[in-house]
Amino acid sequence: MKDTNDDLSLIQQVAELHDKTAFDRLVRKYQSPIRRFFLHQTLGDAQLSDDLAQDTFIRAYTSIGTFRGSAAFSTWLFRIAYNVFYDYRRGLRPSADDLDAARPAAAGTDQSLGMDVYGALARLPDAERTCVTLQLVDGYPIERIAAITGMAEGTVKSHLFRGKQKLTAFLRQNGYS
């Protein structure tokens, strides 16, 4: 509850006083989770993830006056990130083969596993990848994923079920049990 009150106080300072220091505190608090979200959506493209995260925070700053507090600030911010990513995807739709070709060859086992996971994620439709990473990586419950994506909870559950099945099948085909 303290985090929520801190966020609300900072949001109020930004919205009413245009306090950039308060916004900087929000950015520092949420930068890593937002960037991690983008890393998984872009299949490990750190530069693109940083660019998308920056776009997210710019949009959040310019529209912070629209935040009503009906959901947690982090949910509102992830919704902006979700929209930024899908705006980006509408303009550029690389195939899974393009994404595989853009990745460097793996040097070691840990890196190899990461490449295989990104390879598996690349084969998921955007909605499935988003739901799967928000749940398995970020630990969000179905209700929160629904709020972030704007999908019905039943739709989120379907995307999770199908996405997890596809990930499991891909990883098994590539020697993981």
Image (cartoon, rainbow, N blue to C red):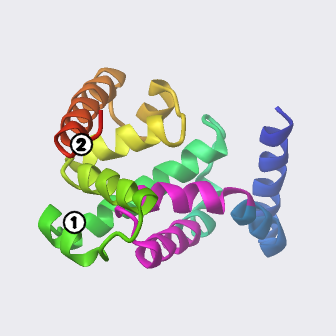
Quarter of the image where one finds residue 152: top left
The rendered magenta stretch, by its main secondary structure, is classed as helix
- Figure check: 38 above or below 152: below
Binning the other alpha carbons within 10 Å of mark 1 as few (below 14), some (14 to 19) or many (20 upward) gives few
Examine the image and state in which quarter residue 24 appears. bottom right
- Check disc 2 and report its element: helix, strand or loop: loop
Q: Tell me where the magenta segment starts and ends, as one range.
A: 29-58
Q: Position of residue 31 (x, y in %)?
A: 64, 63
Residue behind mark 1: 90
The residue beneath circle 2 is 175
**Which residue shows up at 62% across the image and 46% down it?**
74
Q: Are the two marked residues, 1 and 2, in contact with CB atoms closer than 8 angstroms?
A: no
Q: Residue 174 in the image: x percent, y percent?
A: 20, 46
26 falls in the magenta region? no
N-term-proximal mark, 1 vs 2? 1
Total number of numbered discs in the rendering:
2
Question: Depth check: 136 or 105 in front?
Answer: 105
Above or below 116: residue 99: below
Q: Is residue 51 left or right of residue 157?
A: right
Residue at (86% x, 37% y) in the render: 2
Q: Position of residue 13 (x, y in %)?
A: 82, 61
The amino acid pointed to by label 1 is Arg
